[in-house]
Amino acid sequence: MSEHKSYHLTHLEQLEAESIYVMREVAAQFERPALLFSGGKDSIIMVRLAQKAFWPAKLPFPLVHVDTGHNFDETIEFRDRLAKEVGSELIIGSVQAEIDAGRAKEETGPNPSRNRLQIPALLNTIEQHRFDACLGGARRDEEKARAKERFFSHRDSFGQWDPKNQRPELWNLFNGRMDFGENFRIFPISNWTEMDVWQYIKMEDIPLPSIYFSHSREFVRRDGVLLGRCEHITLLDGEKWESANVRCRTVGDVTCTGMVESVANNVDDIIEEVAAARQTERGGRADDKRGETAMEDRKKEGYF
Amino acid sequence: MSTETKGYLDMDLLRFTTAGSVDDGKSTLIGRLLYDSKSIFEDQWDAVEQSSKQRGDENVNLALLTDGLRAEREQGITIDVAYRYCATPKRKFIVADTPGHIQYTRNMVTGASTANLAIILIDARNGVIEQTCRHSFIANLLQIQHIIVCVNKMDLVDWSEDRFNEIVADYKEFASRLEVPHIDFIPVSALLGDNVVERSANMDWYQGSPLLYTLETMYIGNEHNHVDARFPVQWVIRPHSDEWHDFRGYAGRVAGGVFKPGDEVTVMPSGFQSRIKGIHDIHGDVPEAFAPMSVTVTLEDEIDISRGNMIVKQNNPPQSSQQVEAMICWFSPEANLQERGRYTLRHTTNEVKCLVKELKYKMDINTLHKLKDDREVRLNDIARVSLQTSAPLHFDRYRRNRATGSFILIDEQTNNTVAAGMIVG
């Protein structure tokens, strides 16, 4: 940390201090917290912030990954390596298992998304492990329904979010009280933007999966979104596989994560690119394009 | 908005809240600020353009940029506090956007609790109205040090300098009863963009800066107390590992003052004394810690410290008492404040039970009169109360320190946060 003769913190230092404070509140106020880990950049910085919050002790909670079975290979390798480095238990909730058990039904069509199917897998994992608080890396700048989220987001015993009846959050006083069977979703990086995340990755020199950086890949253009070639996507009439240098701005299910054409292969170049970007990072997410309030509807059902 | 790669390590952060009554054009102002500062992306713009067309709006409805939930879009209202973000190369902004109608006080108090600055909107046609006074009173109650009064819809009063000056004079007269140190006035048209980001070509009589420039350059260096050293312990770190066998660190966020290794400290409430051995983060030792840093502190002596305790400097203790005088804002739509009622009180990292000993008076926040006969404290009411707590609180007056002078009340039946409190003494 730099010198602070004037007792001044930069925006990144203030955001970091706030997120660390929230994580420690979670450890103190809940009995069985867990950190939802997707392998994306936001959950990677969440792990870094948690390490900082509890250093030199290990994280006082496990990492939980809701595995859609439609992942980028790079993300899974990265996830396993990071969990090992951090020394945390890794719990995997499987969408495939939900489908096999008949609790979830696979979508059909040219790019069937398993995004929504994460909801039952997540809720089951929470119930099975009796987690009372799940830390997530969602940010308010990502999407308009998320702009109204709290740091401590109360969920009823069905995992549902009631946006009209949220607890007010004042100063830095967080109220994590609840009844049996209820739980909380906690969003420590609520106040970060995509730019803040990249600047922090640069400042802290945090390693990321290779798909965030420019690489050559085959893809198809569909509804303005570039979808990477994989076994789950079938070409429609008039579509063809193309090849170019691309990278991901967000990382989710392979069937809905759009790529951008980019030659940015290091964090500095990505920061330049983000600064000049004229599309939100979720602009390439096919799952958000399913209607004006697609995110709000998924959240009410128990999505992150 | 172009944030250059270089220089971001020096950027600072300004949190502000916006207040205005219904139809003052608050959402439009924020939409304009985001749009003109290029914080709106093409896909967001396309979505709003399309929605505006569907709704039959004449122009692109900038308010739709900020109204996210289904009910809000359907009813054309804003339900809750929403947070927006924008940045210039100099500064990052966090905007607490609070709606102007139902539950207004509750939402504005919430938004103001973390804000450095409040923007108060006045419709140039209506001038200073009851709600303007209410918003200013709340900003003052929450100890916001800067207010920017935006006189909006100047296009509808023919860009009149006289009208602007009249409103400024009215506001100043009212504000003389408050204690806000810095107040600026800016004539704007949020709809047309005058004096929001770009200087207005229609009001060359206005010599001041546009809104964004004012926000960018406002001095905000004195927001935290750097005098009275306060460290509420959040969590005790004991690694139980071979490498860190004897490590016992106290994790928390500095709530006031400056701590350095070697400082002589007292732990409240036990009164045990020790010296700071080290201040640590993952990168190593930190030479000093001040608000609002999150750090881990070790002490020279092994003493029993747990969450809810407060480490302070020996020569400058906080007040400690089981009797607390406070202003509260009532938040619950379900139940009114119960005189002689019992609640859970959360203050810093500490939690105690409390009894409402006496309701002193209710505030009429439109007239600033004290109401002693009305004993019903309902949703959105502000009142002065005396509380008795089950264990001593270690606090400073809210005016001296927002972090150690604030608390919330929780209803034990519903677990809901039912009040926000500011300690008077």
Image (spheres, coloured by chain):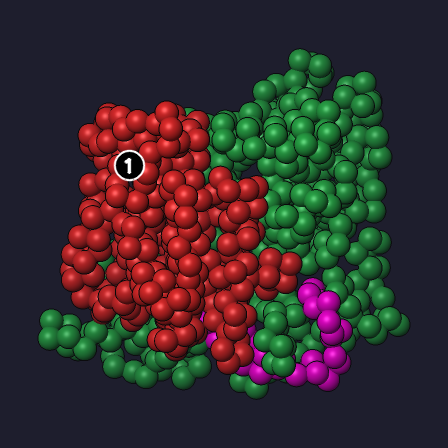
Chain colours: A red, B green
User: Which amino acid, by three-letter code, is at mark 1?
Assistant: Gly
Foreground of the two, A219 or B231: A219
Please name whichever residue, B247 or A3, is drawn nearer the observer in this view of the structure.
Answer: B247
Which residue is painted at 76% across and 73% down in the image? B336
Callout 1: chain: A
Q: Is residue B51 left or right of residue A135?
A: right
Q: Residue at the front extreme?
A: A237
Residue A173: where, in percent of width, then height? 52, 65
How many numbered marks, from 0 up? 1
Task: Indicate the secondary structure of the residue bearing disc 1.
Answer: strand
Q: Is residue B3 above or below residue B319?
A: above
Residue B218 appears left or right of B264? right
Residue A233 image-quadrant placement: top left
Residue A11: image location, x then y, percent: 40, 43
The part of the image, by quadrant, that contains residue B241 is: bottom left
- Which residue is found at the position 57% from the left and 86% from the top? B390
Q: Tell whether position B356 is magenta.
A: yes
Determine whether, in the image, residue B425 is placed left or right of residue B290: right
* Residue occupied by mark 1: A228
The magenta span reads B328-357
User: Would residue B88 be visible to someone looking at this image?
Assistant: no
User: Percent x, y for residue B360?
Assistant: 77, 73
